[in-house]
Amino acid sequence: MAPRAALLHFLPAALALLLVVAACSAAPGVFQVRRRFPAGGGAAALRAHDGRRHGRLLAAADLPLGGLGLPTDTGLYFTEIKLGTPPKRYYVQVDTGSDILWVNCISCNRCPRKSGLGLDLTLYDPKASSSGSLVSCDQGFCEATYKGKLLGCSANVPCEYSVMYGDGSSTTGLFVTDVLQFDQVTGNGQIQPGNASVSFGCGAQQGGDLGNSNQALDGILGFGQANTSMLSQLTAAGKVKKIFAHCLDTINGGGIFAIGNVVQPNVKTTPLVAGMPHYNVNLESIDVGGTTLQLPAHVFETGEKKGTIIDSGTTLTYLPELVFQEVMFAVFKKHQDIKFHNVQDFMCFQYSGSVDDGFPTITFHFEDDLALHVYPHEYFFPNGNDIYCVGFQNGALQSKDGKDMVLMGDLVLSNKLVVYDLENQVIGWTDYNCSSSIKIKDDKTGATYTVSSHNISSGWRFHWHKSLVLLLVTVLCSYLIC
């Protein structure tokens, strides 16, 4: 669902779906990615979406990136993939907070045929692909999805799915297997088609905002850690290494999204918390302008309904109430004359100078001495006429279950190369020019190749004038038991 990374509930209930389906070597790969935001709303609606949302050696893949990750622009990053034989193009949201890949199907009810993003949408037609087939409930993919064999399963019974998102949106359908085509990196700036057989959702019915054409895409591509994710499937097939990276460019839009072993720039890492379904890390301290905040130890503890999550599918950053208050006090300590205004429920103020010159850098310190520097132009965003709004949000306004969590979204991850190394269960980042390029190693040949930035959305960039927009973002329910 629109990013809403989503708390995914796969419901094995029988579905009356009228779907008829015709029953190597690792190399770097590339997918084109963009970003989108829906119009309307404001912080209240944004927080509502966020709160409900919170789910062998090989080479590399490059996913061309587009869009702009500011609350006043497009909002979600998405990519272009090709499915089926012959291959057809689909635009899917890239979401590190959920696991499965799904696209709208030809038999879908309420699936948008047009998109307000200026994209041509395509409905997946199983009968039109000579390589497509249904996933039956006794196959390994279905059993992995449901963590066991479904009751009443017998031969040739299709594997059904129902994904329910926290904001009330939903998608239901059948799992299918077909050929995914992606771009393999074969040299500096050079690609060639690569392909692999993957299982994904064929959406037959959409509910809630998923039926809205204003900001519609063809589906969602989950980059979570589960074995059912596209990344895990490509890794199991020996097509890619279980490492991916993104660099989200809020200056020019687009950026870099690649699968593979990043060797340049060098990125320092911190361990992922073991046994957690999302990208949880251990936050140890926070300083503002070089002064460490005196915070109680419990705010840094990791456990059920608490801890720190890195998620590119969320736009803003949410802090526990005590942490939020201390951070805001330190940020505005030298500006006590500033008057705040409520702009669509964002905390905003007027400032005519450079925010980078007038306000302090916030630094989050993680296990193994990894720091995340967040500059004023990243935790503030402009809203016209010298008005700036705060991108940090009080987690207590999210939900009672999410009030003790630190959820770090795009506004603090942008303009940084973020590497998710699931082979070694670490994540890391470094400040970076996301309009430039990175180098990825082909583990088959030992060669290193350049992967450059992309902005496949530049032709349809939205201009929202001076109004804020409702972002389609991940929801905290995907990180909680809701």
Image (spheres, rainbow, N blue to C red):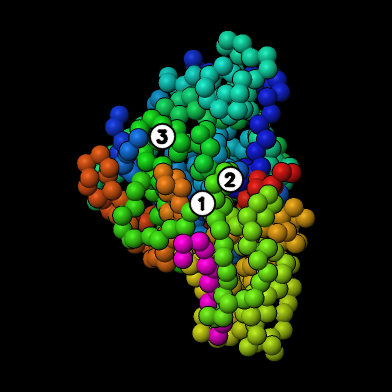
Query: Which label's residue is closer to the chain start, 2 or 3?
Result: 3
Quadrant housing residue 387: bottom right
Q: Which mark is residue 234?
A: 3
Q: Which residue is mark 2?
A: 276
Q: Position of residue 386 (x, y in %)?
A: 60, 80
What's the residue type where badge 1 is placed? Leu
Please say if the residues under marks 1 and 3 sit with CB atoms less than 8 Å apart: no
Q: Which residues are magenta?
A: 358-369
Q: Quadrant of the C terminus?
A: top right
Lower sequence index among marks 1 and 3: 3
- Residue 324 x/y as whole percent: 68, 70
Q: Are marks 2 and 1 in contact (CB under 8 Å)?
A: yes
Q: Is residue 374 above or below residue 171?
A: below
Kindly indicate the quadrant of the structure image that contains residue 263.
bottom left
Question: For numbered disc 1, what is the local secondary structure?
Answer: loop
Question: Is residue 206 located in the magenta-colored stretch of the structure?
Answer: no
Dot 1 corresponds to which residue? 272
- How many numbered discs sit on the rendered protein? 3
How many angstroms separate mark 1 from mark 3 (CA)? Answer: 21 Å
